[in-house]
Image: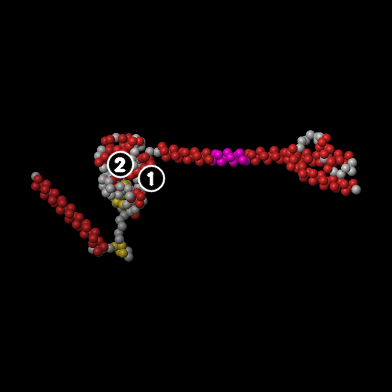
Amino acid sequence: MQSLDDTTNGSMQAQQQQQDLPELSKLSLDPPSKQTQSSAPSTYNNNYNAADEKSSASAALQSYQKAAVALQASNQVVKPNHQATISNSNVNSVALKDGVVEEESSEISASDDGSWITWFCSLRGNEFFCEVDEEYIQDDFNLTGLHLLVPYYDYALDMVLDVEMPMEEKLSEQQQEIVESAAEMLYGLIHARYILTNRGMHAMYEKYRSAAFGRCPHVFCQGQPVLPVGLSDLPRNFTVNVFCPRCHGLFFPKSTRQANIDGAYFGTTFPHLYLMTHPDMVPMKPTQEYIPRVYGFKIHSSSLYYKNNEEETAQRRLEANDRNSLNRRKSRAGR
């Protein structure tokens, strides 16, 4: 009978523990009060003796105290780590956001601090241009005659030099587009004059050394760097070409964007004056010459293959001889 009661007592204690486990964190480690001791055995059978009730209550209290201590210890260990993880993740996310904001602000400030000249030279397709010193542009002597070629000259010059326009002189959208196009033309014509100076040649030398203008497509030139040149000093006549110092050949730029640049922005003088100023930069002419062959045999000079070339060459020689003889006659008549 007593063993059956003990079994019943154990099962009821387990049920009581399951019901009280959510409230374990509220239990105190001090000895239980009389109300706790009296309320615990009230749920059991009144036939239990006082010794059994006291021993069961003390066993239940000890189990509750152990569970409470373990629960508190687990809370003390888990919660700080969880909070630390959350705080670290928050700090990392804030730092990441701050880094993005700082990076964006630095890009914006860099774009705001850049001048119009730097912006224009950094555009895709404008790699042939060098940056002209603002001191050179501010000298009116260097701009002589350009006001006759560039529309909206004063507005274009202010745009190139980053001079803010007064509010009362604000232009319409159509006029603004014209001024922007005029500013590009004005800078190009100034650039053609600037690269003939010592500072301009030095700036172009850096590009020439790095082959920024491209290389000669002639096979026997062996990748010789080229220089930009125009076929006219007046704008809107010819696009820019590249001149090979080794074979003296004239070619189109490799990039289509660069091939659309006006040749007057580099002029007809620059590459030749540059090589005359720096004779050590003049390369040797190719020693090899391409000879056309058919099945390994040279084509005879009397062949129709050379007919057109020989006729043009002979005609040019005759015209040159005629001009020379005419000049001699004039000189003799003048004497």
Q: Is residue 43 above or below residue 247?
A: above
Question: What coloring was used for the rendering?
Answer: secondary structure
Picture coordinates of residue 105, whole percent (x, y): 47, 38
Q: Earlier in the sequence, mark 1 or mark 2?
A: 1
Q: Which numbered circle lies on residue 123?
A: 1
Look at mark 2 in the image and give the residue it sits on. 186
Quadrant in which residue 297 is drawn = bottom left
- Kindly identify the residue that appears in the image at 82 percent across and 39 percent down: 39
Say what amino acid the circle numbered 2 marks: Leu
Question: Which of the two residues, 73 or 47, is positioned nearer the viewer here?
Answer: 47
Quadrant in which residue 34 is drawn = top right
- Kindly identify the residue that appears in the image at 26 percent across and 42 percent down: 149
Say what amino acid the circle numbered 1 marks: Leu
Question: Which of the two residues, 126 or 328, is positioned nearer the viewer here?
Answer: 126
Q: Is residue 333 visible?
A: yes
The quadrant of the image that shows the C terminus is: top left
Label 1 sits on a secondary structure element that is loop
**Residues rendered magenta in the picture:** 85-96
Question: Which of the two residues, 87 or 266, is positioned nearer the viewer here?
Answer: 87
Label 2 sits on a secondary structure element that is helix
